[in-house]
Structure formats: structure tokens, C-alpha cells
Image (cartoon, helix red, strand yellow):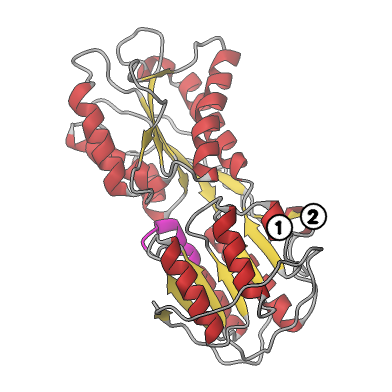
Amino acid sequence: MKLKKVLAVACAVALVGSLAACGNNTAVTDDVADSGSAAMEQGEVEAVEVSSDSEVSVFYYTYSDTYISSVRADLDAALDDAGVNYTDYDGNNSQTTQTEQVQTALSKGSSLLVVNLVDSGSDDAAGNIIDLASAQNVPVIFFNRSVSEEVVTSYGSCVFVGTDYEQAGHMQGELVGNYLVENYDAVDLNGDGVISYVMLKGDEGNAEAIARTKYGQEDADAVLEKFGYPAMSYYDPNASSLYLLDQTGSWSSAQGNDLMQTVLSQFSEANGNMVEVVIANNDDMALGAISALQNAGYNTGDGTYIPVFGVDATEAAQAAINEGSMTGTIKQDAEGMATTICQVVTNMKSGVDSFEGVNPENVVGTWRVNIPYGTYTAE
């Protein structure tokens, strides 16, 4: 199977200087501690100075997410190198747990919150954390999971480090479309002139999942139509929605495997209605789908190949792509995100502008930084 060369795109982010403080990397889950709330302040991002040896609290939506695990490893390393005293918290995919952890950290005197929100896109959840932090004049850095501009800018000591999440969907759609144009006859297993696809969506209300689901399909169709091919057709003509949802919201390989196994139990090459391309919102679900395909005899290196696309460019996905069982993915730069977060942390601890030293091409207004995506196919 002929694949494109790597088109990897990485952002240039500033390296972080050392600070004179002791490092501390402790993973904990704490009980509730009471904390008050206050009205949110309006205005631009303020240069906030916090004590150099006070604790920075880093909250992850879950440790089990493969991409988030990469961000955590890179951020821990960056904070250690910078001499920052910090504690990591595992929200275990529960917003209630995470909010309680924030209360506990603030009660212990945390001076800066770095938050990977559990309930992505929830203004209430993000606003509640801002209320808790602003009551004690503690800065907040949200990262990775979408938080609205309205919420971030409601507090002068808050910023967001993430991505232009629509970009990933557009890039994945273009990647899928270009691959299909180059390999149309091989992908069209039943020879009906139309490509049958399945879309694996990670989380119903997640902004990233919504954009990837929408543009991964729409932009692929746009490429096909540009070259004179018909739009893709969803594999199940009786489906009420044009995606299969991970009901747990965990974007997991286990869910990807289960969903794909269910599809293969009803739709097959023998019946002439086999799924001919798999588009997944992330690499874990893509890899789970590949496992199900391989159990059915596909993507093993011999016989029929079903192209599978993901997002993240995790190490496991890169290995699958290079060995030929997966087709391509959109790189979400874990190291770039971690380094940028650390830069903002050290800026806040030094009392300088929050985005000093950050690539200005990636800064949006006064409230956020976008880490660019890239395309990863076979080396």
C-alpha cells in the first residue's frame, strides 16, 4: 500500500529557564476542602507574580488518556527542569472529583492552577473553577480541553493553552480525501463507485470531537468531489446519526474495538456492504478499530486492507502506521503544549507578561495560545 511521506509540522516554542525552587512531582487524589467563591473580574490578562517556591497544582481530566499521559510526562519534565514545585491530580474523568481537588489544592495554599477540564466546553464547570481561584487571587491556566473565550477573559488572571480544534478536523478530512483519490479502486471493495465509511466519535459534547467528526467527513468529501468522485456514504443507511459514539466519553481503544466489532458483525465484505474506510476522532479509538479489523482478517499485511485514520500521533499510532496496519493521523504536539504551559507558568511566577517567550504566531489576542497540528503518515 503506497503511503505518503511524513509531513510532520511542529510548532516552535520557547525553552524554559530555571527557577530557584525545589521540584516536587506527586500524584494525589484528595478529599473535599471548603473554599469560597467571588465575582469574576473583567479585563485583559494581567501579569501576575506568585511566590517562587509555592506549589503549582496541575489537574488532568484523566491519567488514562494516552495523549494526556504524554502531555503529563512532558510537562512534569519541563517543570522539573524549571525547578517548579508542583503536584499532579487525576480527575479520573469526573468533574465533581476535579472541582473537589481544586478546592483542596487552594485550601492547602496552591498559588497557581493548571487545569485540563473534565467537562470540556462546560462554561459552568470552568466558571466554577475561576470563581474558586479568583476568590484567593490565584491565576488559572486552562489547557487542551476547550474553554470559551467569554469564560477565560472573565478573569484577568486566566489564559488558555490549546489548539485550533477545527484545524485537526480539516486536516484529517483532507488527509482522508487525498488518500482515497490516490487509492480509490483499491478502497472501493464492492466496486459500486462509492466509498463506505464509519466515523468513531469520542465524546458527544466535546468541541474537539464535534469539529473532528464534522470536518473529517465534510473535507474528505470536498476533496473527492474536487477530483470528480462522489461523496462518501455512511456505512449504515438506517443510522440516526453519522457517527458511532464512545458512550463512556473516554475515547478509548476498548470502545473503538467494541464499536468496530459490532459493525463487522452486520456489515461484511461477503455481503457486499463492508466498511471501506474508518475515521476516528483519536488514535486510541483508531487502534481499537484496527484490533477488531485484524481479528476479522484485515490489515494484517496479507489480504484486504481497510484504511484507518486517527488524531494525536501517539507512539502506538506511529508504530502502527509505519508497520502498515494504520494509514495516517494528525499530530497533536504534546511536547509543544507542555513546554508552552511551562513557559506560561514560569512567566506568571516571575511576574512578567503571561505569553512572554511564546511564539507570537501562536498567540490569539490576550487570552490563548494555539499549538499547531501536523500530518503524520508512513516514514
* Relative horizontal placement of residue 276, taking residue 215 as reference (left or right): left
* Relative horizontal placement of residue 106, taking residue 307 as reference (left or right): right
Report the disc number at residue 368: 1
Identity of the residue drawn at 79% across and 59% down: 366
1 and 40: which one is in front?
40
- Quarter of the rendering occupied by the N terminus: top left
The answer to whether residue 320 of the structure is visible from this angle is yes
Image position of 151 with respect to 196: above or below: below
Q: Amino acid at mark 1?
A: Arg
Image position of 327 with respect to 97: above or below: above
Q: Are marks 1 and 2 in contact (CB under 8 Å)?
A: yes
* Relative horizontal placement of residue 376, taking residue 359 as reference (left or right): left
Where does the magenta region start and end?
A: 64-71
Identity of the residue drawn at 46% across and 74% down: 101
The rendered magenta stretch, by its main secondary structure, is classed as: helix
Q: Residue lying farthest top?
A: 192
Report the disc number at residue 365: 2
Q: CA distance from mark 1 to mark 2?
A: 7 Å
* Relative horizontal placement of residue 267, taking residue 27 as reference (left or right): left
- Image location of residue 21, percent across then percent down: 61, 92
- Image location of residue 296, percent across then percent down: 18, 32
- Image location of residue 186, percent across then percent down: 36, 18
Quadrant location of residue 327? top left
Q: For the residue carrying disc 2, how many other residues have a C-alpha within 10 Å: few (<14), some (14-19), or many (20+)? A: few
Quadrant location of residue 223? top right
Q: For the residue carrying disc 1, how many other residues have a C-alpha within 10 Å: few (<14), some (14-19), or many (20+)? A: many
276 and 212: which one is in front?
212
Identity of the residue drawn at 30% across and 28% down: 305
Which structural element holds mark 2? loop
Q: Does the stretch in magenta take in 179?
A: no
273 and 174: which one is in front?
273
